[in-house]
Amino acid sequence: MANKKKKLVVLTGAGISAESGIKTFRDSDGLWEGHDVMEVASPEGWRKNRELVLDFYNQRRRDGLHAQPNAAHLGLAELEKHYDVTIVTQNVDPLHERAGSTRIIHLHGELYKSQSTVDPSLIYEMEGWELKLGDKCEKGSQLRPYIVWFGEPVPKMEQATEAAMEADIFAVVGTSLLVYPAAGLIQYAPRHIPKYIIDIKVPEVGLAENLIKIEATASEGVRQMMEELLKNL
């Protein structure tokens, strides 16, 4: 009988997509492409100016159409041959999917989907990159970007927490571990398991034990982690 694959749970953040040319907004000035993040990533911003919000995400979608997964995304997909891999991502781009990963939990929504404003359970795959005023769900309500904005609950957090609790190996790639509740996931991973932290500047991690810190870009760090994981099969 074949050995059961070990469960590898990987939390990814903006740093893994930055290498594919996708801009991040967590800069010190609090601006995202020249906008105050609260104007384009909060329920208040949506209420104030729907057209601005729709246009902002249309630009993100258009810019991301041709973005390609980098070596870090491809490496994590490759690991599925040897491990039972779950990706928990804070990113809204589809680069993990494009790389071939099959189990992905998008904590903060998905850029190429839209959502009903009256019934959050109505989520639609978008055709193309544009969402306009007047585009409506089947209940006749305006569609909004399927993005978890600041101040909104994170519906998939429970699913991500369960995955972390069942992990045999936990990894963090390209995230500063500052955005909660996602940053707290590492605390749910079993204490005794190895926990890889990969970032150009490895963030401080509270009470987690058995940390293996790799100070590198996402691509280089994932390569190093893969070497270790494949050696230990």
Image (cartoon, rainbow, N blue to C red):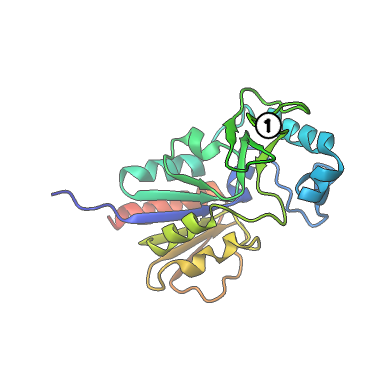
- Which quadrant of the rendered structure holds the C terminus? bottom left
- Examine the rendering and report whether any part of residue 92 can be seen: no
Left or right: residue 157 versus residue 21 is left
Helix, strand or loop at label 1? It is helix
- Residue appearing at x 72%, y 57% in the figure: 151
Residue sitting at x 85%, y 40%: 49
Q: Is residue 190 left or right of residue 143?
A: left
Which residue type does callout 1 highlight? Arg
Which residue is farthest top?
128
Taking the spot 70% from the left edge, 42% from the top edge, the residue there is 23
* Image vertical order of residue 207 relative to residue 93, above or below: below
In this rendering, the answer to whether 203 lies above or below 92 is below
Badge 1: few (under 14), some or many (20 or more) residues near its Cα, within 10 Å? some
- The number of numbered badges drawn on the structure is 1
User: Where does residue 142 sit, x and y in percent of width and height?
Assistant: 73, 33
Question: What residue is drawn where x is 20% and y is 52%?
Answer: 3
Furthest residue toward bottom: 207
Q: Is residue 34 left or right of residue 141?
A: right
